[in-house]
Amino acid sequence: MSAGAVFQEVLRVFNRQHLPEVSQLDVLAALEAGRPGPLAFLYEAGVEAELPRQQLFTRAVAIYLNFCAGNLADDLIDGDCTYLSEPFRLGPCVQFILQNLFFHVLAEADLPTQTLSW
């Protein structure tokens, strides 16, 4: 259930973006391809750190978005990207969107500036 709760928050963040429908489908495919990935671990790490619920979900969402960007890059390199119709044309754009969403969520995470500058 914890992994599912994090993924649902990922979807809420994703749905607040105003992407064209075709982009939404491709990004959603990349988000699904990363499942289950680190979702349960991210939740449990936040609980272990005793983060407040909103901080836990914000940080977990950001990390998952970055994980999915890396997962997509790996799949493109290995030729394993079967979830995009034209991986070599669409993949870099999807990866760019995921990485920007990662930084967008982190910017809203109320982290110290020094932490974000790394």
Image: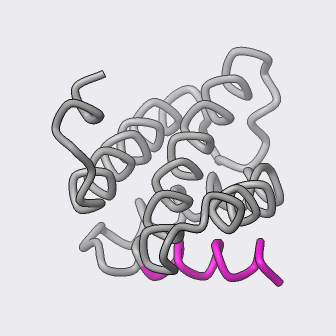
For the point 76% across and 50% down, which residue is it?
38
Is 118 above or below relative to 9?
above
Quadrant, the N terminus:
bottom right
Q: Residue pushed farthest left? A: 113
Position of residue 103 measured from the top left corner of the image (x, y, whole percent): 30, 45
91 displayed left or right of 83: left
Is 10 above or below relative to 26?
below
Query: Quarter of the image holding residue 48?
Result: bottom right
For the point 65% across and 47% down, which residue is it?
84
Q: Per the image, is 35 magenta?
A: no
Position of residue 45 measured from the top left corner of the image (x, y, whole percent): 70, 56
Q: Which of 24 and 48 is in front in this view?
A: 48
Is 15 above or below relative to 81?
below
Is 45 above or below relative to 117?
below
Query: Quarter of the image holding residue 14?
Result: bottom left
Q: Nearer the viewer, residue 113 or 28?
A: 113
Q: What residue range appears in magenta? A: 1-12
Q: Which of 63 and 53 is in front in this view?
A: 53
Q: How many labels does the image show?
A: 0
Q: Per the image, is 5 magenta?
A: yes
Q: Label the magenta part by its dominant secondary structure.
A: helix
Query: Quarter of the image holding residue 32?
Result: bottom right
Quadrant, the C terminus:
top left
